[in-house]
Each structure stands twice: as structure tokens, then as C-alpha cells.
Amino acid sequence: MDTNQYLEMFIDESKEHIQACNEHLLELEKNPEDLGIVNEIFRSAHTLKGMSATMGYEDIADLTHKMENVLDAIRNAKILVTTEILDVVFKAVDYLEEMVVDIASGGSGKKDVSALVNALNLIEAGSSLESLATSETAATKEAVETDNSSIQKPALRFDDYEMTVISQSAEQGFSTYDVTVQLRDDCLLKAARVFMVFEILEKAGEIIKSEPNVQYLENEEFDQMFSIALITKEDADTLKAKVMKVSEVEIVSVDQIDLESITKDKVASAAETVKETVSNDVGKQQEVVAQKGKKSAAVQSGNKTIRVNIDRLDVLMNLFEELVIDRGRLQSIATELHNPELNETVERMTRISGDLQNIILNMRMIPVETVFNRFPKMVRTLARDLDKKINLEIIGAETELDRTVIDEIGDPLVHLIRNALDHGVESPAERRAKGKPEEGTVTLRAYHSGNHVFIELEDDGAGVNRERVLAKAIKNGIVTEEASASMTDRQVAELILSSGFSTAEVISDVSGRGVGLDVVKNTIESLGGYISIESTEGQGSLFQVQLPLTLSIISVMLVELNSEIYAVPLSSIIETAIIQTSDIMNAHNQKVIDFRGNIVPLVNLKETFEMGGEQDATDDLQSVVIVRKGERIAGLIVDSFIGQQEIVLKSLGNYLQSVFAISGATILGNGQVALIIDCNALIK
């Protein structure tokens, strides 16, 4: 059987089962006597074994088989769950993940697992009940073999045309078989297994009928068993062997259909019986049909899910971005021509493309769970290495983010969590001395707010030591001693995000936080987000990351500078203002204004971008865009405001990646290129 067509499905399902194993193993460690959890792990391992064996990845199948033996002994109370045993099983799951990743990258999935297999064998042998387990497995297999001959098959009924086909096929030397397949009770994707069985049988001959019919099989509206009428020249044993290779198939029965026992008279009689029954109770039958139809519709609606390669969504997004650019061009032309019909058409196109944009963006949204689910196991391992007790709580894992943002946010979160465990949460002895529980709590939460997603990491550890951080920052020249006196606790805490700030010499101190956090900050800001810190010494810290929902299409305010158009992201803008030139003041060689009771520094974009054309000193009014980054605010001086617009964010490419304060570019409706201003860089 050609398994390449199922490779992508195998990889996706394998990753799901491996993740399920990790999650349930963590639960089992907390509740070692809960055999329900062991059964869940066993089910995932068994399914993975069957899938890998079908695909020909014997190393994965062998390793999962050894895992099954240990899990089977645990659930049968022959082995007690201990941390040492779980460590070995965790290692086995790690190896399985590595092999699946290797397969996904085009490899063979092979890995030397001999040492791990020996460890699993020792665990199993230590129970002294290996022979019993083997005999039970053999007994189960024998029971399945015995049951194979007595399974209750779905009845295949043939009409006149089908009977003629069977008869003529027999005359030409073909045989007609009733192939009955029973899937395992724990089969997860019944429709996929049915598809694989049909694929095998269609290559062996011609399928003329199935019971239930194909529609019910596709919608998974059957228990675990289905029958197929197949016309072929292959023998029954060959067919049975082929179908048994499909994973999660428990029983296969292949019996030749006897023409003498299936006569037209019986078919007619059965049809007459059905007809008579319907005529006797039409109302009842209509009600049953209606209820069945509703059930079918409900089941069908619940299964309208397909896997789509992310590359296809990227292509779709790129095409839509071009449509957005052309939409802007049409709007510009319609405004110039003042044609009512054209304006009406453009408005309708704008509404429809807006709906299409929402659909496409939602298709690209992925739950942050795909990132969060790697952390529980990482926290367990790191806590053991640090000899600390950590309880990780995850809240809001269903919150969705654009796939592009998801791809980039994983590593910064890993660094933040490692930092919290290493430098934030104290050792059990220190926590006892402070009157805290020995087990520290780290909470990871995500939630939507407006057009942003917030991800927060909170711990109940030592917090940031203000004096130590300030002393280090002054020593490194990050702040002056005079400025440090007026800094708030939040400003002090955020110093650990500064480039060049290091606590290597006091890494054993529980308040010495910040190793490498400048990299985290830069990554988050490159995504159009920002990170802030709230910390109370002795009580803990809260790292808050704000991220845009998507990076592809953004809303901006278009502004003019020397007849050139620039775009300022709306997510960074507090408001726009027209101020009196006389209201501009100077403080520490910096132009500032008093904006709603706050002293806000001004940035002259013409000077920043070296555009020339200084502002006319005789102008009484100045156009200012008030922007924000975290708690810091600045005012950008521009010539004029043009208006709001949705634009497609395009990268400047590798050659121009280091241009200061420019995050990208877009093409406007008139074909002109507008640069997008990076407000974070300007405020920084």
C-alpha cells in the first residue's frame, strides 16, 4: 500500500497523541492511583503504535509497544507508579516526539532507543509478572480470532441491477465477497479508517455496495462495523491481510457471497415487506425519517472540518492583500470621478472584501494552546533540576492569535518562564522562612482585549529587588544616579529588560532577574507589541505582553511630510491634536508640550528622517500625533493628517532591514509607496 498520501495525516495525529501522553503523564504524577488516566495514556500509545506500524515506522511501533507493556502492568496494579518510572516513560515520549519530527522533516524516523527499551524491560521485569501479561495478550488475541467467525454483520441487500452485475461477474471468473470490518472501540477517526479500507479494496476490485451507505460512513453515523460488497479476482485471505494492516481495525471477515441464497424473489419479498410496513404507519415512518434527517444534519455539521496546509492559507492571504491594494486604488479613482454608480459599486465591494478579510484572518487564527502545551513538561523538568516545587496554572489557552505571531512568540515565553523559575520562585527552604507555601505558583494566562491579545506570566516569588537593580543599572550606565531617585517601581522593574543589563554576578540571588530579557523585549516589539513588568518585592512579579491579533493587514493613520505620505499604526496612537506653536516648551534640550497634565516630548519627524524643509517658524499651529509605548508617550510632529485606512504591511526585505524607525511599507490606492513608522523605535 502506498502510504505517502497518508503521511501528513499520520504526522498530525501522531503529534496529537504524543501531546496527549505528555499531558496525561503530568496528571498521573499528581494522581498516581487514578487508573482512568493510565487508560487514556495507554489508548494514545496503542493508537500511535498501530498507526506507525501501518506506515512502516517500526522503531516507533516497537517503542510504543514497550510503553504499552509498562502501562498495562500499571493499570493492572502489577507495578506502582513512581517518579522514577514516570521519568523513563517521559523519556520514551520525548524519543517518540523526536522521531515524528524527523519524519516530518523528511527523515526515516529511526533512532537508537536500545537503552530506553532496556530500561522499560527492566521496569516490566521488576513486576515479576511478564509471563502473565504475555499470556493475557495471547488470550485476548485468541478471543478476537474466535469472535471473528461469529460477528453480527450488517445485512447487504441487492437490487435487480446489482444482482445482474454479480451474476455476470461470476460468469467471467470474478468472485463477490462480503468484507465486514469492525473498528476498535477507541478508534478516534472512524471516517479516516473507512476511507483507508475503501482505498485498499478499490485497488483490489470494484465496490458495488456498502452497508451503511457511503454518506453515513463519511459522517461516522455507524457504530464500529460496516460491510462492503466487493467484486474481485483476489482470494479472501489476501484481502483480509491487506485490510488488517489498517490501524485501529480490530476484526476483518471476508466471506464469498452465494448467488443461490440471494434470489430476486427474496429481494422482492423484502421490498414488499418494507412497502407494507410503510403504508401501515406512514405518519410514524415520516417522523422517524425526519428525526433521522435532523440527526444526520447535526452529525454532518459537527464533522465539517478539514486540515488545510498553512502554505495555502499564506497564498490566499497574499492574494487578498493584493485585492486590498486594488480596492484602495478603486476608492481613489471613484473619489476623483464622482460617479454615483461607481461609488455605490466600490462601497459594496468594500463591504464584501471586509467580510472576506475577517473570514481569511479567522482561518489563520490558532489557539495559543499550541504554544502553551509545551510548558507543563518543561516546568516539571526545570523544577526538578532546580530542586524547587512549582505549580503551573494555565488560563485562557483557547485564546486565538494569528499564526505568524504564534510562530514568533514561543521562544520569548520559554525564556520568561525559565527566568521566573530560575530567579523568581524561591527554593522551598526560603519560602518556608518567608511564611510561604513550599510550592511556588506560576500562572500563565491569555485573553483578548480590543484588537490585541494579552499574555501574562505571574509568579508568587521574590519579586524585583529595587536597590540591587538600580545599583546594577547605574553601574552599567543605563540610568544616572539623579534620574534613579525619581523612578517608580515599575520603571525600575523594567530596567531588567534593558540591553546590556546582566545579573550574572548575582545569579544566585533570588532578586537577580533579567538574564537575556532584552532579547525577549526586542522580539515582542518586532511583532508590534510591548512588554511591561509589575513587581512587588517579596510577593512576586507580573510580566504582561501585548500583541496585535494579526500582522498582515493593519489600520493606520496616513500623515503627510514634505508631500510624502507616511503611515502611523492606529494601535500606537492615543489621539491626534492641533496645538499652538507657542505651547511648545524646552526641557533638557528637548521640545515638550503639556498634554492633559502630562509632559510629553515631541519628535520632529522631518529632522528624524533628515528630510529637510524645516517647519515654518511663522506657523501658529502644529499637527501632532500622540503615540504610546507602554506607559511612555511621545508626540510626532507632522505637516498634516490625511485620514485612517486599512493597509497591507509589506516587509522592506533583508537589504533594508536596519532602517531606523521604519517597520515596513505599503502600496496606496494611487500606486504610491508609503513607509510605516515604527513608533516603538521613536519613543525608545
Image (spheres, rainbow, N blue to C red):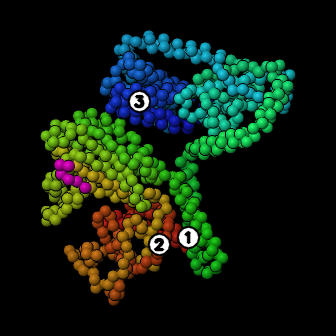
Taking the magenta stretch, the answer to whether it contains residue 322 is no
Q: CA distance from mark 1 to mark 3?
A: 56 Å
List x then y, in percent, for residue 359.
Answer: 55, 57
Q: Quadrant of the C terminus?
A: bottom left
| Placement of 318 over or under 433, stated as above or below | below
Q: Residues within 10 Å of mark 1 (few under 14, many from 20)?
A: many
| Placement of 663 over or under 388, stated as above or below | below
Say which residue appears at 70% left-offset and 31% top-offset. 211
Say which residue appears at 20% left-offset and 59% top-offset. 489
Q: Residues within 10 Å of mark 2 (few under 14, many from 20)?
A: some
Say which residue appears at 41% left-offset and 19% top-offset. 76
**Is residue 240 visible from the viewing direction of this image?**
no
Q: Which labelled disc corresponds to residue 328? A: 1
List x then y, in percent, for residue 197.
Answer: 65, 29
Where disc 3 sits, the SS reads helix
List x then y, in percent, for residue 328.
Answer: 56, 70
- 535 or 483: nearer the viewer: 535
How many circles with numbers are drawn on the protein? Answer: 3
Q: Tell me which label, 2 or 1, sits earlier in the chain.
A: 1
Taking the magenta stretch, the answer to whether it contains residue 536 is yes
Q: Answer left or right for 97 relative to 616.
A: right
> Which quadrant would residue 143 be assigned to in this image?
top right
Q: Which labelled disc corresponds to residue 37? A: 3
> Which quadrant would residue 220 be assigned to in this image?
top right
Q: Which labelled disc corresponds to residue 644? A: 2
Magenta highlight range: 534-539
Q: Which labelled disc corresponds to residue 468? A: none
**Residue furthest front in the image:** 280
